Image (cartoon, helix red, strand yellow):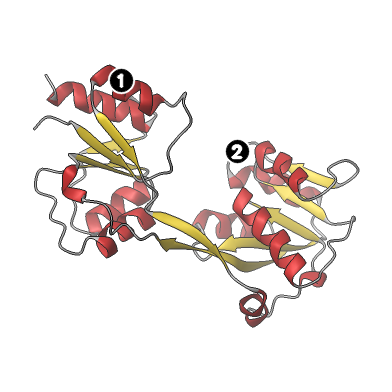
Amino acid sequence: MKIKAILVSQPAPNESSPYLEMAKKEKIKIDFRPFIHVEGVDAKELRAQKIDLSQFTGIIFTSKNAIDHYFRLAEEMRFAVPDTMRYICQSEAIANYLQKHIVYRKRKISFGERTFSDLLPLFKKFPTEKYLLPASDILSADIQKTLDSANIDWTRATMYKTVCSDLSDISITDYDMLVFFSPQGIKSLGMNFKDFKQEDTKIAVFGTTTEQAAKEAGLRVDVMAPTKESPSMTMAIEKYIRSVNK
């Protein structure tokens, strides 16, 4: 079956996106729609977790969402974040995002290369801080494992949650391929379209955890990324399209 229409479960990209180039080149329609979104918890929910922001001397940030929700809750709870706070960020891009909330200069800010385990040398360098990890309700096992192996004092605080978006205005059968990037996206498909039967619809997934979630939901995975041959999702889709749209 030829692929003519694809639904990507992410927000619409900017004008220079490889998806838009692919749509033009392969003469197909590509729509974008987030299947999940983030909702912040309130101060009452944070207190119920027995979190007192004033007890921490360091913060570990793994995303821009974590930064936004930490400072939002600090303001809501009238907590003035001290200038002496140590910030450990997963990447330089996340560290730079701190400028939205603090005066970057003269602050104690460190960052890793890319993955969370890259932060281990920083925890060894600053082992005496009492760290807070602002996180979503879904925490990667790798993060927990890395923090436990670092032998530091750390506490997780759920400051935002990943929830399924309302997709009732979408006709899912209009698409020949659905593209997913997280297990939560797969969950949202099941919640929004309870009668969905895959049949000829192609499913593309990014990452092994998404692949596993799709299989557990009884879906057939037709396109997988990243692979050695196709390191990006667009490359994997384009390769698949060329094999079926002959």
For marks 2 and 1, the one nearer the N-term is 1
Give the residue drawn at x 10%, y 43%.
Answer: 200
In the image, 215: left or right of 10? Answer: left
Cα–Cα span, label 2 and label 1: 32 Å
Q: Is residue 63 visible?
A: no
- Pick the quarter of the image with the N terminus: top left
Instruction: Return the residue nearer the eye: 246 or 156.
Output: 246
Q: Which residue is mark 2?
A: 114
**Residue 241 in picture, x, y percent from top left:** 20, 26
- Pick the quarter of the image with the C terminus: top left
Question: Which marked residue is nearer to the observer: mark 2 or mark 1?
Answer: 1
> From this viewpoint, which residue is outermost toward the front?
169
Q: Is residue 30 visible?
A: yes
**Residue 187 in picture, x, y percent from top left:** 32, 60
Q: Height in image: 27 above or below 182? A: above
Amino acid at dot 1: Lys
In what element is the residue under mark 2?
A: loop
Amino acid at dot 2: Arg
Instruction: Return the residue nearer the eye: 219 or 30.
Output: 30
Give the residue drawn at x 68%, y 54%.
Answer: 67
In what element is the residue under mark 1?
A: helix
Q: Which residue is mark 1?
A: 24
